[in-house]
Amino acid sequence: MNIEHLKLFIRLAITHNISLAGQELGLSPAVASMHINKLEETLGVRLVHRTTRKVSLTEEGETFLPHAEEILSSVETARASVGIGNNAPTGTLRVSAPSSFGRLYLIPALKEFTSRYPGLNVDFRLSDSIVDLVEGGFDVAIRNAELKDSTLVARKLAPDNRIICASPNYLIEYGTPTTPEDLRDHQFINLSMIQDITFNSPNGPITVKPKGSIKADNGEAVRDACVHGLGITITSTWCSYEQLKRKELVPILTDFPLISDSAIWAVYPSSRLLAPKVRAFIDYLSEYYGSPPYWDK
């Protein structure tokens, strides 16, 4: 059984795209398709359903996948034991990430990462919309939202600490809220995906649905509106730590910490065999951000 055919089949199971899977292994679409055909001929079963848009595994393909992963893992372990091959990441790593976090923290981290892995290309898609990793052909996504898709695996990279804050000028003009309920009497700059805010208090959780005339779907835009005195907002410390250091924003309601389990996650399609380029990227980010991450130190 050809090991290269198995590698292609495993990547195909993740990307659901023969051209993309072949491209990652340096194969043309025609050659990649021929390799899958040969693997099917060797096994005597059909492994994939082909359509004009994507491919999916047949029942036999789903059954064969874990065995293919185990075979390839065993081969790579055997090679490593005698010093054959180095598993250095190569090809193209396709990454989806929120626009603000990507611009502020992923792009600056790239210089050292690309120096470590010169054979690897990185293709970013920065958007605040949640993308379908499999449909979009992404290897990994960076997210700060709760994982709801059981077909994905998530690894925590850093906490996503959130606070309520305002500019000093706003507080001078409109006063400082002393309880969560006071937010109802203030202008609140809403981040589109946040509807309710829950605080911890000595008497238990308090949930508030603040109102305001300004809303945006981008954390940096909400932060900047707050800096300009347009209202109070909720922000992540990774997004606003420079403004907090310069006292352009000040935390409020600090006696009522937010109840949130948000974090920065690396999310990737479920597979027992994680591609070396994905593992290298996730391990690097964990090291780069540190614990706690540098924006919370």
Image (spheres, rainbow, N blue to C red):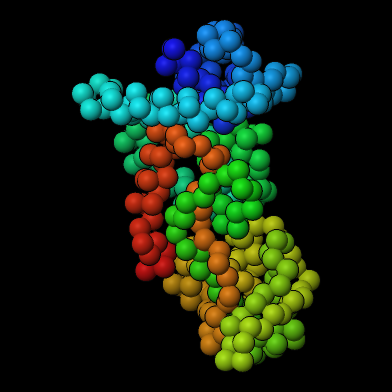
Whether residue 294 is visible: no
Relative to 225, 237 lies left or right: left
Residue 163 drawn at (x, y percent): 55, 74
> Observer-nearest residue: 285 or 186?
285
Whether residue 55 is visible: yes
State the image quarter where residue 221 is shown.
bottom right
Relative height, residue 20 to residue 94 (above, below): above
Which residue is at 78% across, 71% downward? Answer: 213
State the image quarter where residue 116 is shown.
top left
> Observer-nearest residue: 49 or 225?
49
Number of numbered discs on residues: 0
Which residue is at 62% across, 87% downward? Answer: 204
> Observer-nearest residue: 78 or 262?
78
Relative to 15, 264 lies left or right: left
Residue 275 drawn at (x, y percent): 44, 33
Residue 269 drawn at (x, y percent): 55, 39
Which residue is at 54% across, 12% downward? Answer: 43
Residue 28 drawn at (x, y percent): 55, 11
Relative height, residue 136 to residue 174 (above, below): above
> Observer-nearest residue: 220 or 259?
259
Relative height, residue 197 to residue 67 (above, below): below
